[in-house]
Image (tube, rainbow, N blue to C red):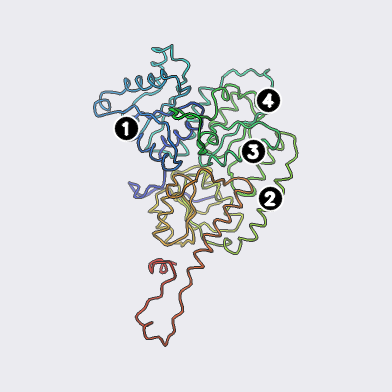
Amino acid sequence: MAEMIKRNKALAVRPAKSSQPVGGSLATLGLSKAIPMLHGSQGCTAFAKVFFVRHFREPIPLQTTAMDQVSTVMGADENIHEGLGVLAKAGKARLITLLSTGLSECQGADIHRVVKDFREQNPDLAHCRVVAVNTADFKGSLETGYAHVLGACVRDLVPNAADASAPKTRRVILMPSAHMTPADVEVLKEMVEDFGLEPVAIPDLSVSLDGHLGDAKFNPVSEDGATIEDFETAHQALGLISFGETQDYSANLMVEKTGLPHTRLSGHMGMKATDELLMALHKLSGQPVPAKYDRQRRQLQDCMLDTHFFLTHRRVAIASDPDHLIAWKGLLDEVGANVTAAVTSTGSLGLKESSYAQVKIGDLEDLEDLVNKHGADLLIGNTHVADLAAEMGLAALRCGMPVYDWIGAQTKSWIGYRGARDALFELANQLMHREMHNVAPYRSVYNAEADNQETTPHGHPLQTAARH
């Protein structure tokens, strides 16, 4: 059981989280011919758009209801009607997710009623589905916004009265964690295919945000992803596998509507998590685990031997959302690394029941304070955590979102035996590289100039050396 330390500040000095509308938009971008529309000011949407463009380095379809001073006070129902009408009449969008923001939540906007009114007034636009989701900025995180959109899609798009007599397919529905990269989802689908099964990822970022050149010069909606038909025929699948606690609501609702057997995996990184995933696929398919995974497992074991000199008992600090922290803890425990500082965006029951000794709900200033108090050799987190590591003179491993200062974050896979192996090699290389340059130069006691010189490790500021 982890000790959860609640926030003790009235503000976030260096925020360690991304907002719910960003997470909701990310989930929408993994659905085919879909577009998120944020109900708020233009700035609310511009922030999310810049966030995605800088992380994925791709054009991102995103719309706004553009609330201004007048509509904020007098009501913005007309803005929603006009925005939905424009997107639906253009004929490209099959699905629009209407996401509230901090501004519209504070205004008290009832987006569900507005969507119902829009449906009644525009029966000719029934070809375009609209899913309204409350995703206030001032609570939750990227993970919860992602989960809310997925849950709302299951609620609205999966039929309540599924045909139990419909023939079963070899399909397996996957609900990836919010922090799984497009490459992670692609690897996950390949693993399912290796068991003779047909993967359906909901949402599927591996075909929409994997960084490929499309045929169209311009696409105003997401180019590919999970389709509406994937939701409507979910009851024909063999089973459902979900990753992370935040997916529980969506997965349970899917099971309630379809009766699918459900396998819930709390983590997705490391040997144990991969073992559990492969065994789940073995049970669903009735097929033996392919021989190539035995070899990959042995490669991971060899990697653990190679890297244990650098990783065992090393001090690690990490900051991210709850499910992402739980996934990382599984891998760090397997190599004997000690987490001396863990900061999360919001609390969760899964994190409380995890093997962390202590988790702080806070910001990056809290992470810095914990590192100064307990020490750390390496920081794990997004670009902002890497910036903090640079200031403190520590090694950093970039993961999660956003990663602005490292190209190709979406192509990096962390799951499976190979993902774990690559992560361990990168952690070890980060530490080995810094320690190779962290040897203080020898200065003879007979050197008169040494009296006026302070010893500074190679490549590090003096302040950093003091912290070590």
Secondary structure beneath dot 4 equals: loop
What is the x, y in percent for residue 438? 47, 69
Cα distance in 3D space between marks 2 and 4: 30 Å
| Image depth: mark 3 or mark 2 in front | 3
Three-letter amino acid code at the position of disc 1: Gln
The reply to whether discs 3 and 1 touch (Cβ–Cβ < 8 Å) is: no
What number is the disc on residue 55? none
Callout 3–callout 2 Cβ contact below 8 Å: no
Question: CA–CA distance between discs 1 and 2?
Answer: 49 Å
Task: Please name the residue that numbered disc 3 is placed on.
Answer: 190
Task: State the CA–CA distance, disc 3 to disc 4.
Answer: 18 Å
Q: Amino acid at mark 3?
A: Glu
CA–CA distance between discs 3 and 2? 16 Å
* Residue shown at the point (59%, 58%) measured from the top left: 336
Give the quarter of the image for residue 219: top left
Q: Is residue 382 left or right of residue 197?
A: left
Percent position of residue 212, x then y: 52, 37
- Label located before the other in sequence (3 or 1): 1
Question: What amino acid is at disc 4?
Answer: Thr
Q: Find disc 1 in the rendering and name its residue.
A: 42
The one nearer the camera, 167 or 329, is 167
Residue under numbered circle 2: 297
Residue type at tag 2: Arg
Q: Secondary structure at mark 2?
A: helix
The Cα–Cα distance between marks 1 and 4, rounded to whole angstroms, is: 44 Å
* First-in-chain label (3 vs 2): 3
- Of the pair 171 and 141, the residue shown nearer to us: 171
- Which numbered disc covers residue 169? 4
Counting residues from the N terminus, which is met first, the one under dot 1 or under dot 4?
1
